[in-house]
Amino acid sequence: MTSRIDDLVAGLATVRDGDITSEPDGAGGRSLLAAITAEDAPAPRRRRPRRLPGLVGAAVVVSAAAAAVAVLLPHGGRPVPLRSYANAAMSIQVKGTEYEVEVKDAYADQREFGKAFAKVGLDARLRIVPVTPEHEREIVQSGSLHAPKGGESTVGMLGMSDIVMKCPPGQSACPLRVRLSGSVYRLTGADIVIGRKAGPGEVFFDARPVRGDRAQGLRLAGRTVAEALAELRRRGLTSAFTLGDVNADGSGSSWASPLTWRPSGERRITGAWMRSSDSVGLMVVPQQGDPRPRPVD
């Protein structure tokens, strides 16, 4: 028994490979192909570019930044020194030829001080160093940093510095205040060293070899090296030796020996001084075979 579908398939005309061509057969087929190929392919739709959010605002910000640079860097891009500047370490106010400096953190990275001075157009080096108690909050050294710019003469130019040493009543700690005045600093720069309280074991910047005893009640001058070292060990103090011959007025010459060097025990101590809170400097007169001064680079 066959189905209706089988009867329909059996009634179809047989098509052989040779009967198939790429061109339509008959006038109707050719007319249909011509109508199809005559139509133009549809043009692709043009898509409008998307505007990114905030793009206009960004352009305004860039323009504003460029304008700010133009204001801060006039005259061909050269930065204009500021009239005041502050960072975590210090603040500076410029008033005419005076620089009023307030040091807020005496233990800050010393390079931060130089950066602050550069912002106000001054080539200066400020060092805050540990010192003996009698020189805390004092200018212990000051001078020029380099030769005058352009070879200009500094004759008659002023260069003064002073410091507020005392804290206001009722305050045990307060910022250091320094005033640099005079046009000479603009030509030669300034090299200022200020004393601060030393921490435990910090070597005093102002420790200098002396003749005689300057070591907090110790009587070591004239004693042998062996006796002096025994006394220091008993008191829990360390030592460092200096070779030299220094007079009572400070004249003479001296140089530090290597920290591990020790003279023979029978040699005599000619001077003793505190070099830190827990260390004493000891001086002996140099002899043949002792360490020689190290050359200065």
Image: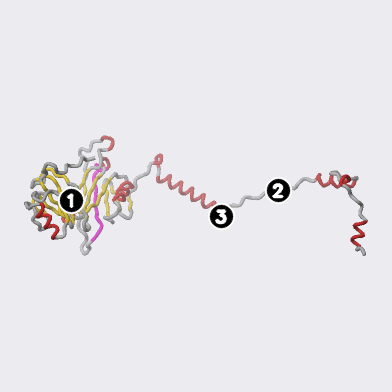
Residue 133 quadrant: bottom left
Residue 289 quadrant: top left
- Can residue 63 be seen from the camera position used here? yes
- Of 50 and 71, the residue lying toward us: 50
What residue is shown at x 71% (from left), y 48% (from top)? 44
- Of 79 and 39, the residue lying toward us: 39
Labels 3 and 2 touching (C-beta < 8 A): no
Residue 71 pos. (x, y %): 41, 46
Residue 122 pos. (x, y %): 29, 45
The residue under label 1 is which amino acid type?
Answer: Asp
Q: Which residue bears the numbered disc 2? A: 44
Furthest residue toward top: 151
The residue under label 3 is which amino acid type?
Answer: Pro
- Of 96 and 256, the residue lying toward us: 256
Which corner quadrant holds the C terminus?
top left
Residue 89 pos. (x, y %): 30, 54
Q: Which residue bears the numbered disc 1? A: 206
